[in-house]
Amino acid sequence: MASSLKNLSEYSSKQIVDISDKKIAIVVSEWNEEVTESLFSGAVETLLSNGAKKENIIRKDVPGSFELSLGAQFLAAEDSIAAVICLGCVIQGETRHFDFICDAVAHGITNVGLKYNKPVVFGVLTPQNQKQALDRAGGKHGNKGDEAAITAIKMLGF
Ligand code: DLZ
């Protein structure tokens, strides 16, 4: 289903596990900050409402979405960290930057998860414009940050 037809914050409670003792890291891209801050708030609220302890949520910022993979790798390499959530927003522009960044970050994040055998979640919006981004960052289509947090929890219960 296209994400425009779905409220991204709806999820089933299948595979929701106890995360009260899990350290979860969130990497946040500074590009399109208004959007990524909303994604971050959504992710944190969802982790807390599912039992995470505030002191177990670690935040690190990176300059742009392209840097999310390396940021995730630094964190995933730490034994104490159970899962990493990557949050970014790449808005389609007039140059091919969009394709390069989206491809790189999707592959990079996938590889980090496979390398460290840990959930590394792709919470990156790839909208055509700022409005579509805000609709998915706490707007009418929910908050992709919530979805990213739930994905991390579900994968911890895998
Ligand atoms: C350069 C760039 C551009 C054009 N657009 C975005 C964007 O929409 N979202 C985003 O997160 N980052 C963007 N960046 C920055 C790159 O991700 C990266 O930080 C720089 O290319 C430096 O490696």
Image: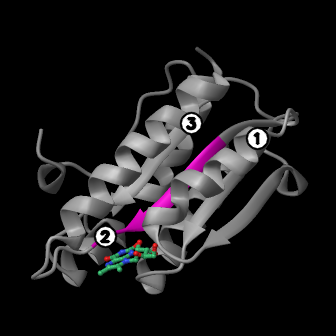
* Horizontal arrangement in the rendering, residue 13 relative to residue 141 (left or right): right
Indicate the position of residue 158 as horizontal and vertical percent values. Answer: 58, 14
Q: Which part of the image, by quadrant, shows the N terminus?
A: top left
Q: Nearer the viewer, residue 44 or 120?
A: 120
What's the residue type where badge 1 is placed? Gly
Q: Which mark is residue 90?
A: 2
- Distance from label 2 to label 3 (Cα)? 20 Å
Query: Of helix, strand and loop, which one carries label 3?
Result: helix
Q: Is residue 72 magenta?
A: no
Provide the residue designation for mark 1: 51
Identify the secondary structure beneath mark 2.
loop
The kind of residue tagged 2 is: Val
Q: Which residue is rendered at x = 25% and y = 61% of the image?
A: 100
Q: Which residue is mark 3?
A: 112
Where is residue 87? Give x, y as percent. Answer: 50, 60
1 on left or right of 105: left
